[in-house]
C-alpha cells in the first residue's frame, strides 16, 4: 500500500487504539519526590536519560493535571494521608509507579515511622526495585506503564476496569 | 574544661560514663530540676544567647530515668580587639528527670526551645510546664506512645506482633540446598548432558 500525496486519502483506526496511543505517548507525572529516590527521578529528566522523549515532557505539580504518580522515597506515617489525598485528587485514568524499595515495601526502614509499602494506601501499577533504582529502571517502569496503557487493563478513552 | 565523663547523678551506681571523646570544648554541668530554671536564666544573663539544641537521653535502668540536655552557645562580641575574638563558648547543662516529672519550659528565654521541647515531648514523653503549644511534632498528632523510649517496640506496636521475615528460617537455608533448587552436582550434570547431545 503506497501512500501517495494527493487529496482524498484517509486512514481508518479504532478510536480506542488512537486514544490509547495518545495517552501512552504523553504520560505526565506528578512530582511526588519524597526522599533520595527523588534525586534519581530528577536525573531521569536530565539530557542523558531524558524522560521527555517518552512523552513525560513536564512534571506537573498539581494532581489535577497529572496522570502518573511516581512515589519516590520513603513515606512517613504523617505523609501517608497526604499521598492518599493527592492520589484521590488525580483525575481518571491514573497510574502509580512505586519507585524504590521504601515506597514498595518500607525498604530498610522496618520501623514505626515509615509506611511499609504504599500499596497499603494506593493501588500500584509498577514497582521499581532499587535503593535507589538507576534512572534506567525508572525509564523501564514508564515503558511498562505505556505498555499497560496501550495493551489493556486500565486506561483508554473508554476506560474499563 | 573539657571532660569525657558525663557528671553522674550523685550516688548513682548505674550511671553510665560517657565514652565519647570531647568533640568540642564544652563545659558540662549537671543541675537538679528544681534549680534548672534559675541556672538557665543566669546563663542567659551571662551572655549565652543561643540555645543550640535541647535533647533527652533515656537510661532505662537508672533513677532518674531521663537526662535532658541543653546546649548553649555564647558568641564572642564582633566589635572587639584581636585578643578578645575567639571561638564561641559552649556549655552543656544536664538535668536528671524522673519518669512523669515535669520540667519548666524555657521557651520565653530562647525561642528555639519551642520546637525542641515539642520534639522531646513527642519522642520521650517529658512534659514542659509553661509551653504555649505542647503537641507532637514528628509523629502524627494522635499517635500513642513515645517512640524513642528504650521500651518502645522498634517496629511499632501493631507490627511487633507479626513475625519478622527471617531468611534463616527459609526452607532452602534450613535444608542446606541452594535457592535455585539445584545443587552444584546437578548443574554440572546438566551441563555435561547438554554437551554430549
Image (tube, grey):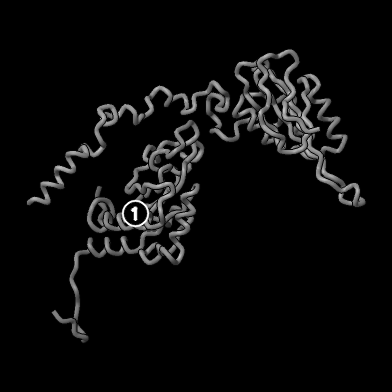
Query: Residue B139 vs residue B190: left or right?
Result: right
Q: Which residue is mark 1?
A: A141
Q: Residue furthest right?
A: B81
Regarding mark 1 in the picture, which secondary structure is present there? helix
Give x and y (percent) for residue B46.
87, 35
Residue B124 sits above or below residue B116 on the image: above
Residue A149 sits above or below residue A1 on the image: above
Query: Residue A53 vs residue A74: left or right?
Result: left
Query: Residue B83 vs residue A110: left or right?
Result: right
- Is residue B100 visible in this depiction of the protein? no
Give x and y (percent) for residue B1.
81, 32
Q: Residue at x 68, y 27 (%)?
A: B18
Between residue B20 and residue A98, name the one nearer to us: B20
Displayed quadrant of residue A14: bottom left
Between residue B168 and residue B98, name the one nearer to us: B168
Give x and y (percent) for residue B55.
67, 31
- Is residue B149 visible in this depiction of the protein? yes
Displayed quadrant of residue A56: bottom left
Amino acid at each position: 500500500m503506497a501512500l501517495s500525496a494527493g487529496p482524498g486519502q484517509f486512514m481508518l483506526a479504532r478510536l480506542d487504539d488512537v486514544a490509547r496511543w495518545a495517552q501512552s505517548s504523553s504520560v505526565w507525572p506528578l512530582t511526588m519526590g519524597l526522599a533520595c529516590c527523588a534525586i534519581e527521578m530528577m536525573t531521569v529528566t536530565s539530557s542523558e536519560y531524558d524522560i521527555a522523549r517518552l512523552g513525560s515532557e513536564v512534571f506537573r505539580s498539581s494532581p489535577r493535571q497529572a496522570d502518573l504518580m511516581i512515589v519516590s522515597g520513603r513515606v512517613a506515617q504523617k505523609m501517608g494521608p497526604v499521598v492518599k489525598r493527592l492520589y484521590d485528587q488525580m483525575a481518571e485514568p491514573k497510574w502509580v509507579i512505586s519507585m524504590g524499595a521504601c515506597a514498595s515495601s518500607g525498604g530498610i526502614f522496618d520501623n514505626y515511622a515509615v509506611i511499609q509499602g504504599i500499596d497499603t494506601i494506593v493501588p500500584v501499577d509498577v514497582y521499581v526495585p532499587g535503593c535507589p533504582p538507576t534512572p534506567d529502571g525508572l525509564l523501564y517502569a514508564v515503558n511498562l506503564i505505556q505498555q499497560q496503557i496501550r495493551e489493556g487493563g486500565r486506561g483508554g478513552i473508554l476506560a474499563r476496569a | 574544661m573539657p571532660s569525657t565523663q558525663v557528671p553522674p547523678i550523685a550516688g548513682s551506681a548505674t550511671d553510665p560514663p560517657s565514652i565519647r571523646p570531647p568533640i568540642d570544648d564544652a563545659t558540662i554541668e549537671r543541675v537538679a530540676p528544681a534549680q534548672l530554671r534559675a541556672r538557665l536564666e543566669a546563663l542567659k544573663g551571662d551572655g549565652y544567647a543561643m540555645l543550640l539544641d535541647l535533647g533527652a537521653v533515656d537510661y532505662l535502668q537508672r533513677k532518674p530515668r531521663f537526662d535532658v540536655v541543653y546546649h548553649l552557645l555564647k558568641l564572642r562580641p564582633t566589635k572587639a580587639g584581636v585578643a578578645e575574638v575567639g571561638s564561641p563558648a559552649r556549655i552543656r547543662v544536664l538535668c536528671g528527670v524522673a519518669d512523669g516529672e515535669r520540667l519548666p519550659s524555657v521557651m520565653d528565654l530562647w525561642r528555639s526551645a519551642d520546637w525542641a521541647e515539642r520534639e522531646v515531648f513527642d519522642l520521650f514523653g517529658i512534659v514542659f510546664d509553661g509551653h504555649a503549644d505542647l503537641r507532637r511534632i514528628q509523629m502524627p498528632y494522635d499517635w500513642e506512645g513515645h517512640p524513642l523510649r528504650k521500651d518502645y517496640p522498634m517496629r511499632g506496636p501493631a507490627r511487633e506482633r507479626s513475625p519478622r521475615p527471617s531468611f534463616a528460617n527459609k526452607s532452602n537455608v534450613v535444608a542446606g540446598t541452594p535457592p535455585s533448587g539445584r545443587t552444584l552436582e546437578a548443574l554440572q550434570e546438566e551441563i555435561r548432558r547438554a554437551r554430549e547431545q
